[in-house]
């Protein structure tokens, strides 16, 4: 079908060019009769036939080229096409203004050839600038939106605008899922950035043959969908990549440097690598430890003894956040709810551990 369209286009172009140029060629030929020179139909038919013969050789390469262009356009991200089109329109507008200014000149070459060159050159240049600078344009748009003073109840907010830093999410923190709850509370502000290479890694995990990995990958995709639909920080999916770097962690560090942003993760190794490169990190595990309830020696607690401890006659209980409580002489209270008094708190790299002893050595009454 496309080949037929190309051939019809050749026929139309050939007929049009035949009407425009063949009469001049007829006048140069001494073998052409006068009626043939003045007959535009003859010129159109001859031009159409000539270009149809050309289409027999050129139609197939043109069709392949059109399909190649179509395939590239379908695979290109929508933001690339959008900013490229905007740049193309700006370039053509500048070319139109320049050619309009040149129309007053009486130099044949400049008034006829130069405008065409300007349209081709500036259109191509505008498209390339819009396509390659899309990340800077998008960042500038989001920065302008975040810096605009908002009005509330008819009163315009005044003061110095807050510079909101980009938060770059890695694969582990997306799969973990707690980032969605943190964003929903409003404590996480700024723009959440999800690189395309992180999405690709997440897709590979979701397509894994291992059922556990597949479940984690699908949960990560659900978390991203929730972040996009819930009220909270805006989500920016960037196509910026670093082809010279193979490791995803190093790509995240490079992206954080280029955006002057912060990496959000719960990966201990990525945390260390980012620190070595001087990139700021928000670790979800550190946040979880920071918001655990604070207990001090001498404070009373009501707990349920779950099991015996490692040492003789010890019992073990847990808080709602998973903090372990080691209870002296608590083995005899396994399965019971008792009141305990905190004796000491130990903070380790693995978490926090609380040591306590039963209050008066008696079981609490069940309520």
Image: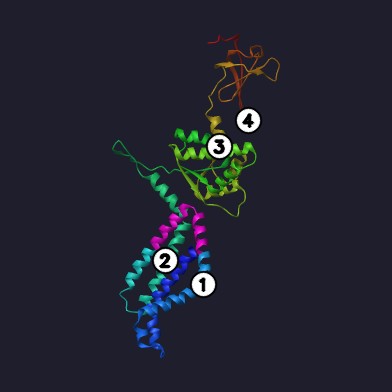
Pair 4/3: label in front: 3
Q: Position of residue 273 (x, y in %)?
A: 61, 44
State whether the magenta stretch is mostly helix, strand or loop: helix
Question: Tag 2, which secondary structure?
Answer: helix
The Cα atoms of the two marked residues, 2 and 3, are separated by 47 Å
Place of residue 284 in the rendered image (x, y in percent of width and height, measured from the top left): 55, 35
Say if mark 1 contacts mark 4, CB within 8 Å: no
Q: Which residue is mark 2?
A: 122
- Closest to the observer: 98 or 21? 21
Question: From the viewer's perspective, is residue 211 above or below residue 127?
Answer: above
Q: Which mark is residue 278?
A: none
Residue at label 1?
56
Q: Which residues are magenta?
A: 65-91
> Would you name the residue on which mark 3 appears?
219
* Residue 73 belongs to magenta span: yes
Q: Secondary structure at mark 1?
A: helix
Q: Position of residue 128 (x, y in %)?
A: 46, 61
């Amino acid at each position: 079908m496309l080949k037929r369209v190309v051939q019809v286009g050749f026929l139309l172009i050939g007929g049009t060019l035949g009407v425009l140029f063949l009469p001049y060629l007829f006048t140069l030929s001494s073998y052409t009769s006068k009626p043939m020179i003045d007959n535009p139909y003859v010129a159109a038919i001859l031009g159409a036939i000539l270009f149809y013969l050309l289409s027999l050789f050129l139609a197939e390469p043109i069709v392949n080229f059109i399909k190649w262009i179509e395939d590239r356009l379908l695979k290109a991200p929508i933001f690339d096409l959008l900013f490229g089109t905007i740049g193309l329109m700006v370039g053509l507008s500048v070319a139109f203004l320049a050619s309009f200014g040149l129309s007053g000149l009486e130099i044949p070459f400049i008034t006829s050839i130069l405008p065409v060159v300007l349209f081709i050159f500036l259109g191509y240049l505008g498209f390339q600038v819009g396509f390659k600078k899309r990340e800077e344009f998008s960042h500038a748009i989001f920065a302008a939106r975040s810096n605009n003073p908002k009005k509330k109840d008819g009163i315009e907010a005044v003061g110095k605008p807050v510079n909101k830093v980009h938060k770059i999410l890695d694969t582990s923190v997306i799969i973990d899922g707690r980032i969605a709850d943190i964003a929903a509370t409003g404590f996480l502000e700024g723009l959440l950035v999800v690189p395309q290479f992180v999405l690709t890694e997440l897709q590979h995990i979701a397509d894994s043959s291992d059922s556990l990995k597949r479940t984690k990958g699908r949960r990560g995709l659900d978390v991203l969908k929730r972040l996009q639909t819930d009220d909270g920080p805006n989500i920016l999916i960037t196509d910026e990549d670093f082809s010279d770097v193979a490791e995803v962690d190093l790509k995240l560090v490079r992206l954080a440097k280029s955006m002057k942003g912060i990496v959000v993760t719960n990966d201990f190794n990525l945390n260390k690598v980012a620190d070595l490169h001087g990139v700021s990190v928000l670790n979800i595990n550190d946040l979880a430890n920071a918001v655990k309830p604070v207990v001090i020696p001498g404070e009373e607690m009501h707990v349920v003894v779950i099991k015996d401890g490692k040492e003789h006659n010890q019992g073990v209980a847990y808080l709602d956040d998973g903090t372990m409580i080691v209870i002296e002489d608590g083995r005899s209270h396994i399965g019971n709810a008792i009141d305990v008094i905190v004796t000491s708190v130990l903070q380790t790299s693995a978490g926090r551990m609380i040591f306590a002893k039963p209050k008066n050595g008696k079981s609490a009454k069940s309520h």
